[in-house]
Image (tube, rainbow, N blue to C red):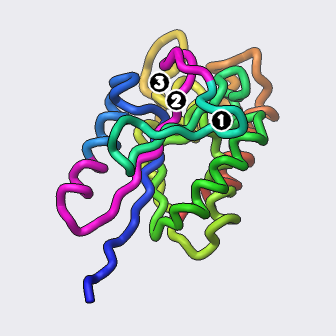
Amino acid sequence: GEVRKLKVLLVSHNHPAIRPGGAERYAFELYEAMRDSGDFEPIFLARSGPPDSAVGRYHDGTFLAAAGDDPNQYLLYTDPSDYDWFYGRSRSKRVGGSLRDFLLAHKPDVIHFQHTVRIGYEAIRLCRNTLPDVPIVYTLHEFRPICNHSGQMVRTGTNALCTESSPRRCHECFPQISPQSFFMRERFIHSHLELVD
């Protein structure tokens, strides 16, 4: 019989057709390369919604929609007002239900996060809890998990390269945020990233 292709779910924070950007473009080119190789069955799930897309929620009760005519491309709607930029988490619990249903319907063999911006680090835990035996891969396109300065690892004010993050050093860049808050941020993000294979 025919050998079943490995089903790889690629999760991106945007679709390049909606908002072109480096990480989005890379993620989509990876999807296309996997699809064109004939060795994989890739699925592309991209976050959508304001401010990048004027489209609101697609249908009542769901936060998912098809992305064009390709049956393996989908959009996941999130509301930016629900996103906590400091912790990198979503305040909405409703999106998780749609994502869980999506995972159970598609049952990927591998989940590859390209980004969790506007989706939330907790999507990693949701994947682990929903499909506990499925390997999770995470590509870091910048240093957001360790740098609150848009993941750029440059000091605020001077733009000098930052060689290490710590609650004290991060507080120096963001004096309005306590070192304790940076410590809690680090613990929260690490608790999710440690679930990555």
Mark 3, residue position: 154
What residue type is disc 3 on? Answer: Val
Residue 167 can be seen in this image: no
Residue 72 can be seen in this image: yes
User: Measuring 51% from the left and 69% from the top, which residue is drawn there?
Assistant: 135
Q: Earlier in the sequence, mark 2 or mark 3?
A: 2
| Left or right: where 40 falls relative to 182 | left
Q: Quadrant of the N terminus?
A: bottom left
| Left or right: where 37 falls relative to 191 | left
Mark 1, residue position: 88
Residue 48 numbered tag: 2
Work out how far the residue at label 2 is from the one at label 3, CA to CA, in angstroms: 28 Å
Residue 137 on image: x %, y %: 47, 59
Q: Earlier in the sequence, mark 1 or mark 2?
A: 2
What residue type is disc 2 on? Answer: Ser
Work out how far the residue at label 3 is from the one at label 1, CA to CA, in angstroms: 19 Å
Q: Nearer the viewer, residue 116 or 180?
A: 116
Q: Nearer the viewer, residue 178 or 42?
A: 42
The mark lying in front, picked from 1 and 2, is 2
Residue 17 on image: x %, y %: 34, 27
Residue 192 vs 183, above or below: the answer is below
Residue 161 on image: x %, y %: 42, 26
